[in-house]
């Protein structure tokens, strides 16, 4: 089943049309407006402008029923999404105005243990 044009909204990031559905957990999920054979969401209309989706991934997922169509989540195809943050370096250098107190704390703990 293909959604009616009145059921589609524009994506805030890329401007393309998306169909908003409600998951079994009650969350909203944007899917691309046309069915896709490789989609991992089973979607169907329960009322005008009201669509339900469920994931087809997972060990206990059932295959799509005859009234459901496969759709692809829009987050997988959105071209306007902000870039993912680059990986941070493994060790960040200390700024010049920061004094590390970790080594000093370790030294104090050793000295206290020796006194007792």
Image (cartoon, helix red, strand yellow):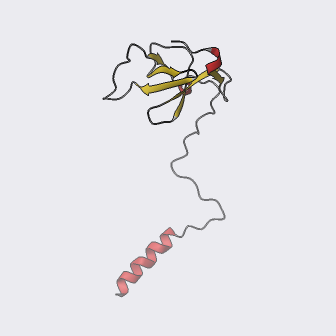
Q: Which residue lies furthest to the bottom in this view?
A: 116
Picture layout, residue 23 above or below residue 96: above
Q: Which of 28 and 50 is in front in this view?
A: 50
Picture layout, residue 116 above or below residue 2: below
Q: Which of 10 and 115 is in front in this view?
A: 10
Left or right for 103, reference 93: left
Which residue occupies 68% across, 23% down?
Answer: 15
Left or right for 103, reference 81: left
Q: Where is residue 114 in the image (x, y as percent from the top left)?
A: 35, 83
Q: Residue furthest front?
A: 47
Q: Nearer the viewer, residue 51 or 56?
A: 51
Left or right for 4, reference 108: right
Q: In which quarter of the image is the C terminus?
A: bottom left
Q: Position of residue 94 (x, y in %)?
A: 59, 59
Which residue occupies 55% across, 45% down?
Answer: 88
Which residue occupies 65% across, 62% down?
Answer: 96
Which residue occupies 66% across, 65% down?
Answer: 97
Counting the numbered discs, the total is 0
Q: Position of residue 39 (x, y in %)?
A: 46, 18
Left or right for 56, reference 46: left
Q: Position of residue 10 (x, y in %)?
A: 67, 24
């Amino acid at each position: 089943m293909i959604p009616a044009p009145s059921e589609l909204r524009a994506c805030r990031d890329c401007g393309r049309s998306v169909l908003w559905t409600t998951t079994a957990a009650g969350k909203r999920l944007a899917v691309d407006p046309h069915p896709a054979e490789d989609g991992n969401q089973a979607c169907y209309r329960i009322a005008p402008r009201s669509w339900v989706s469920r994931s087809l991934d997972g060990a206990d997922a059932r295959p799509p029923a005859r009234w459901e169509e496969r759709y692809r989540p829009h987050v997988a195809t959105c071209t306007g999404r902000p870039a993912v943050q680059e990986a941070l370096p493994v060790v960040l250098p200390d700024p010049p105005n920061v004094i590390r107190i970790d080594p000093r704390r370790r030294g104090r703990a050793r000295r206290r243990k020796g006194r007792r």
